[in-house]
């Protein structure tokens, strides 16, 4: 069996019985559920949950799980026209624990999948199952987060440094912060050429969607230090973007997003007494 943690949604390597513990949840950025460590499987998920598919604007298709499972994030399908090589070259940004025949049908109807790229370990989910469902497409993860991979697979490609071009106009940027390898995806041609940033929760879209925040741990309310937030904001300086999409359905800054990141970083630093 490939056990899936019900709190973080991470799928583990094959074993006869579920693991004794989930290191992802035992890390101080996450938590073990109040009822103790619990497990499920992909087959059980497929029986109790369904794929949620929603238009997220900018030509992006959101893929989530209903009813909500684990952390509750949704993935984004970046369309083939995003400059990543033509028909059949869609990229899946971030990942969810559920993949089923419905998910494959939806994506195949749009031209298939060429690659998966994930912002950080909390969203590794069932990444290997997703890759295999589309013929073993590569999964791009930052090497700084290698230790959090609990189901190794030949499809996983670790990259180093602060930037990696996935294709023309699609660039992975390591901002760090939430995790050492915390990554965002810059889509230069998105928003009619004004640029789109796919941020996961490396940059967290908050309830007032004119603003973002920066955290080491969201559930445990651990902030990031000022120097880290300054570096994260500075890393984005060379990249224009008008819109920013976060980790949940409809979590988006739909205008002047680069300025929103800048003023949000300044507000955060002021709150730390560093502004």
Image (tube, rainbow, N blue to C red):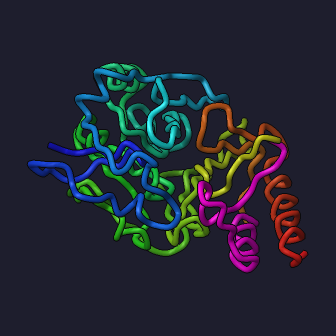
Residue segment shown in magenta: 209-237
Question: Would you say 189 lies left or right of 39 here?
Answer: right
* Closest to the observer, 18 or 99: 18
Question: Would you say 81 lies left or right of 41 here?
Answer: right
* Closest to the observer, 105 or 71: 71
Task: Give the percent coordinates (x, y) of residue 124.
Answer: 39, 51
Residue 38 to residue 183: above or below: above
* Quarter of the figure with residue 98: top left
Residue 17 to residue 108: above or below: below
Residue located 31% across and 29% down the image? 45
In reply to whether residue 182 is colored magenta, the answer given is: no
Task: Give the percent coordinates (x, y) of residue 168.
Answer: 53, 51
Residue located 45% across and 28% down the image? 65
Q: Quadrant of the C terminus?
A: bottom right
Residue located 69% across and 68% down the image? 223
Task: Give the percent coordinates (x, y) of residue 253.
Answer: 76, 41
* Quarter of the figure with residue 216: bottom right
Question: Would you say 94 lies left or right of 273 here?
Answer: left
């Amino acid at each position: 069996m490939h056990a899936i943690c019900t709190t973080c949604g991470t799928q583990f390597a094959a074993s006869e019985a579920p693991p004794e513990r989930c290191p992802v949840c035992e890390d101080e950025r996450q938590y073990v559920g109040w009822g103790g460590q619990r497990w499920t499987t992909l087959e059980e998920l497929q029986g109790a949950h369904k794929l949620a598919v929603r238009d997220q604007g900018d030509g992006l298709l959101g893929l989530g799980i209903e009813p909500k499972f684990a952390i509750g994030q949704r993935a984004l399908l970046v369309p083939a026209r995003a400059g990543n090589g033509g028909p059949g070259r869609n990229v899946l940004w971030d990942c969810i624990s559920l993949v089923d025949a419905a998910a494959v049908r939806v994506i195949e109807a749009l031209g298939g999948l060429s690659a998966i790229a994930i912002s950080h370990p909390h969203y590794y989910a069932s990444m290997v199952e997703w890759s295999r469902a589309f013929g073993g497409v590569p999964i791009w993860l930052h090497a700084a987060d290698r230790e959090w991979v609990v189901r190794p697979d030949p499809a996983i490609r670790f990259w180093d440094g602060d930037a990696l071009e996935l294709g023309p106009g699609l660039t992975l940027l390591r901002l760090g912060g939430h995790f050492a390898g915390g990554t965002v995806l810059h889509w230069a041609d998105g928003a009619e050429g004004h640029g789109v940033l796919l941020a996961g929760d490396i940059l967290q879209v908050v309830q007032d969607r004119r603003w973002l925040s920066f955290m080491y741990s969201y559930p445990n309310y651990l902030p990031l230090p000022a120097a880290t937030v300054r570096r994260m904001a500075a890393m984005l300086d060379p990249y224009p973007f008008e819109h920013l999409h976060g980790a949940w359905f409809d979590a988006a800054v739909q205008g002047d997003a680069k300025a929103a990141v800048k003023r949000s970083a300044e507000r955060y630093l002021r709150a730390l007494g560093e502004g």
